């Protein structure tokens, strides 16, 4: 097996199926904060980062960007 084929298998092991789509709105609960102050929510264990929020906030967010293990969102309400 070639080196790049081995690396491709390793990378695939850590990717999650994304349960959200860019532009869609979701109801979330902020459960934690990051060191830079963004709130963290989860949808099916997929991390959603929302700026200017704090733990305990319940809101509707709109997904703006999706990465391999997380997504960024803005608060709608």
Image (tube, rainbow, N blue to C red):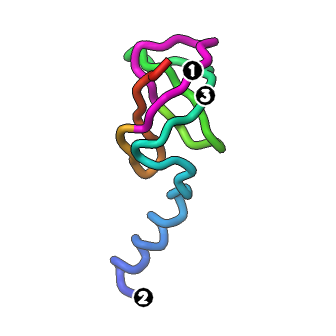
Q: Quadrant of the N terminus?
A: bottom left
Is the residue 36 above or below the residue 4 in the image? Answer: above
Q: Is residue 2 left or right of residue 28?
A: left
Query: Where on the picture, by quarter, is residue 51?
Result: top left
Identify whether 15 is placed above or below 23. Answer: below
Looking at the image, which residue is at 52% across and 47% down? Answer: 20
Magenta-tinted stretch? 49-63
* Of marks 3 and 2, the one in the foreground: 3
Q: Which residue is mark 2?
A: 1
Q: CA distance from mark 3 to mark 2?
A: 44 Å
1 and 3 marks in contact (CB < 8 Å): yes
> What is the CA distance from the residue labelled 1 to the residue labelled 3?
6 Å
Residue at 53% x, 11% y is 54
Label 2 environment density (alpha carbons within 10 Å; few <14, some 14–19, many ≥20)? few
Instruction: Give the percent coordinates (x, y) of residue 30.
Output: 58, 21
Q: Disc 1 marks which residue?
A: 59
Q: Which residue in the structure is indicated by mark 3?
A: 28
In this rendering, the label closer to the viewer, 1 or 2: 1
Q: Which numbered disc flags the more N-terminal residue, 1 or 3?
A: 3
Residue 57 part of the magenta-drawn span: yes
Q: Nearer the viewer, residue 58 or 56?
A: 58
List x then y, in percent, for residue 65: 36, 42
Q: Is disc 2 placed on a helix, strand or loop? A: loop
């Amino acid at each position: 097996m070639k080196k790049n084929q081995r690396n491709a298998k390793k990378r695939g092991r850590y990717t999650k199926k994304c349960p959200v789509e860019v532009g869609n709105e979701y109801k979330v609960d902020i459960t934690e904060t990051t060191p830079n102050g963004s709130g963290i929510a989860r949808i099916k264990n997929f991390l959603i980062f929302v700026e200017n929020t704090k733990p305990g906030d319940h809101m509707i967010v709109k997904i703006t960007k999706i990465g391999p293990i997380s997504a960024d969102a803005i608060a709608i309400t």
